[in-house]
Amino acid sequence: MKTQPKLAGIVLIAAALLFSRNVKAQTTAAHSFRFSLGIDAADPTGNLRIGSNFALGGNGRIQYGVTDRFALTLTGGGFHFFSKDIPGTNVKFNSFGVIRVTAGVKEFFTKNIYFGAEAGVGQEETEHDGAGNTKFLLSPALGYANNRWDFGVHYDHYSGQDDPYGLVGLRVAYCFGL
């Protein structure tokens, strides 16, 4: 039963992409800058699932429209992973966060629907130990954007030090031109 909603979503996205390939995007004007401030709600994956079930983040993104359909992005922000109890105890895992900086691209397939891809680094931060490892970060995204709002679903994959993990997130951002 859980696969039916996922399959329906994939079919809807594929149909939107197939039937609207020739529509020009108008949310990323060529040779102009846009800035967005966003919040993220995320579900940790991989090894992070052991100590956390939920993450919240914030970020700022600057976007430069190379053409009306293609933009370059630079994003900075971070996530806080909310700790859960260590099994069998009343003690929580250490608080954990990641500060991230990425550069990437956005390609609009329709007037408002885009595919994005970013790469960069994530610096781990822990409650008691301070700075931790620096991870390589890859983040594909699919989203909807208009002149004021940007809604995106993304997967962040952090790798390095033989301890990969990730998160599936939903970004909601307010955008404005510069």
Image (tube, helix red, strand yellow):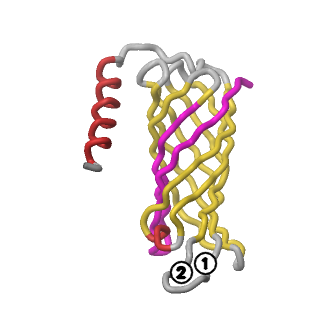
> Marks 1 and 2, Cα distance to the nearest angstrom?
6 Å
Q: Residue furthest bottom?
A: 88
Query: Within 10 angstroms of label 2, few (less than 14), some, or many (20 or more) residues?
Result: few
8 inside magenta stretch: no
Residue 28 locus on image (x, y percent): 58, 22
Q: In the image, what residue type sits under mark 2?
A: Ile
Where residue 79 sits: x, y (%)?
Answer: 62, 57
Q: Are marks 1 and 2 in contact (CB under 8 Å)?
A: yes
Q: Position of residue 43 (x, y in %)?
A: 49, 56
Residue 33 in the image: state x and y as whole percent: 68, 26
Q: Is residue 157 magenta-colored?
A: yes
Numbered mark located on residue 138 in the image: none
The amino acid pointed to by label 1 is Lys
| The magenta segment | 150-178
The residue at the point 44 percent across, 37 percent down is: 142
Q: Nearer the viewer, residue 133 or 151?
A: 151
Q: Is residue 111 above or below residue 122?
A: above
Quarter where residue 36 is shown: top right
Main SS, magenta region, reads strand
The C terminus - image quarter: top right
Q: Which element carries disc 1, helix, strand or loop?
A: loop
The label shown at residue 92 is: 1
- Please tell me which residue lies in front, 142 or 85: 85
Which residue is depicted at the point 59% across and 83% down? Answer: 90
Q: Which residue is mark 2?
A: 86
Name the residue at 45% across, 26% down. Answer: 113
Residue displayed at 53% across by 20% down: 67
Compared to residue 123, the image places residue 109 above or below, namely above
| Secondary element at tag 2 | loop
